[in-house]
Image (cartoon, grey):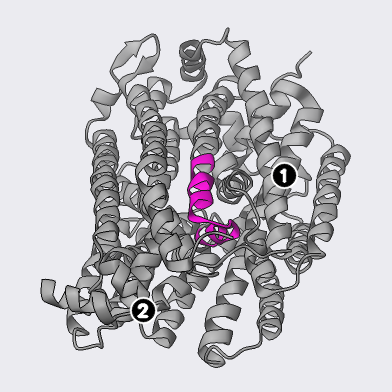
Amino acid sequence: MSPGPVTAQEQLGSVGLNIGIFAAFVLVTLVFVYRASRSNRTASDYYAAGRSFTGTQNGIAISGDYLSAASFLGIAGAIAVNGYDGFLYSIGFLVAWLVALLLVAELLRNTGKFTMGDVLSFRMRRRPVRAAAATSTLVVSFFYLLAQMAGAGGLIALLLQIPNSNRLGQSIVIGVVGILMIVYVLVGGMKGTTYVQIIKAGLLLVGAAVMTAWVLGKYGLNFSSLLGAAVEASPEGEALLAPGLQYTNKLDLISLGLALVLGTAGLPHILMRFYTVPTAKEARSSVVWAIWLIGIFYLFTLVLGYGAAALVGPEAIAAAPGGVNSAAPLLAFQLGGELLLGLISAIAFATILAVVAGLTITASASFAHDVYANIIKKGDARPQDEVRVARTTALVVGVVAVIGGILVNGINVAFLVALAFAVAASANLPTLLYSLFWRRFNTMGALFSIYGGLASCVLLIVFSPVVSGPKSVILPNGGVDFFPLENPGIVSIPLSFLLGIVGTFVGRRERFDTERIAEMEVRSLTGAGSEKAASH
Amino acid sequence: MSTIEERRADTGTVYERVQAGPEFADLRRRLRRFVFPMSAAFLVWYLAYVLLASYAPEFMATKVAGNINVGIVVGLLQFVSTFAITTVYVRFANRHIDPAAERIRQQIEGPAR
């Protein structure tokens, strides 16, 4: 017997069950994290798990890192309420992986050690490019982290039935999420974090697969009749199946598409995952696994989104606490009652936990390895000091994330994810591609491209309708929305590519270090001299 | 240019000698001849899709079979092309990149232990 339709006021599932299932997940992952901690000795262990994961393991972990709550709850909800435009979003997220596969993953694995700064500083003036790389890494990680923590607040409202009026209760839960994440990162390092992501990815994929099969089963395995039922249940009618409900500004849609497709291969927490495997060939296999898993997952969300529209109804979803994000949990309740809701809720929590842990370790690695060891200590830091600084940074990042999460709790900061992608596409990707494929590219080019991309992105967002437009949640009708688009990608990405060329021309009198350029080129393509797996 | 390259082949580091050699040049050319056009192709195909979605929503709403419309079909084709490019690239890299890269790596590092 499936329960009747839910209303916003009705008790949703059992809080005890939700917490119980989540506690079981935490317990299992803590065991793995503790076991991983025993082989955490060197910097390579802490940052890159001793480069000991296989391509398959890393590919599953990458999908765990990438499929954030925004992907799972956000896309399913967007499809349920806004139809086709949610699907469009997921396609950008998937196609983006081809950039990583064809142009970035293998060459990056061969040339770098732990961070993006390693690749850039290989043949350029080290301190300025490391400072630039660390700046953009920290900015992207911070935006992304804030978006995840704010999302945690909304989820809590839904899953633990702590109402939005109970600020203290929600803040305590955000604090618990933060503490757990810090424990994962401090105790388990990259290896522990990777296990958390592998377990979470497995749960997420299985959970989504079960729900997908269930939904399709209800419509006689006929996708077309599912679509028909969704159209009938939606106030938008047929418009649910065509683009245009969510994105009304044509240029904005193109701008978002560009940021999505070019941002993924510049996301620092994704780039760092390529260092956890022993060879470039394993890095390639990681991306292949990630593409298949992420692609199949987004096909599931297509069914789940329209399924939620058909079975729960867009009005019930919009009225529920948590809004659009509640589509998948409400669908789970509709299908399998309390137990399935509890499972899906726990998975959603696990998702946030795993993603913030991945971001925290990336931010701490970039600070400790790029800023502390190579800029402040000029490359002479003792490895144990570097790891100590990384752990301290992880603690600080965790605390900042919790405070930030509490402050922005309740504010819809979904635009921060799109902004993180836009910054990654503008500040990181052009510099990475130029330094991997263009011999003449130099320090000045890298600095122009990173700082120019970063600054233009942040400025355009500040002066966009997101911050001060009529519908803004920050400064409604603030009147400084000079830039008409919500996403800056269409301006900032080409600008950053251009600035890379201009900067290279400006800095053309820099010493052309033929030795290092030759070493980088040969090493990037063949793996000769690249960082090897730890032998323990 | 060629005289500089030849001189470097005699005197430079092992990486400079390899970089100047024909085997490495061949590897680099083969890789770039595959990944650059392929990247351009999927980016154009993706942008065409986004442009269709933003400027031709009526076309995307055209019914194909039952409730399934052009938009859903073209969107699913993006999945198909992504999976296909992935598979083709892996086959290409296994066959044409890895053996050459491994040979050059061994020249530099010595045979694998």
- Residue A181 placement, left or right of A507: right
Left or right, A375 with respect to A488, comes to right
Look at label 2 and name its amino acid: Arg
Residue A339 showing in the rendered view: yes
State whether residue A247 is above or below residue B112.
above
Q: Is residue A276 magenta?
A: yes
- Pinpoint the chain carrying mark 1: A
Indicate the quadrant containing the C terminus of chain A: top left, top right, bottom left or bottom right: bottom right
Return the mark for residue A153.
none
> Which mark is drawn over residue A123?
2
Q: CA distance from mark 1 to mark 2?
A: 38 Å
Answer yes or no: are tags 1 and 2 on the same subunit: yes
The secondary element bearing badge 1 is classed as helix
Marks 1 and 2 close (CB-CB < 8 Å): no
Tell me the residue at 52%/80% (across/down): A370
Image location of residue A30, percent across then percent down: 83, 55
**Residue hosting label 1:** A199
Q: Which chain's residue wears label 2?
A: A
What span is colored magenta in the figure? Answer: A271-289
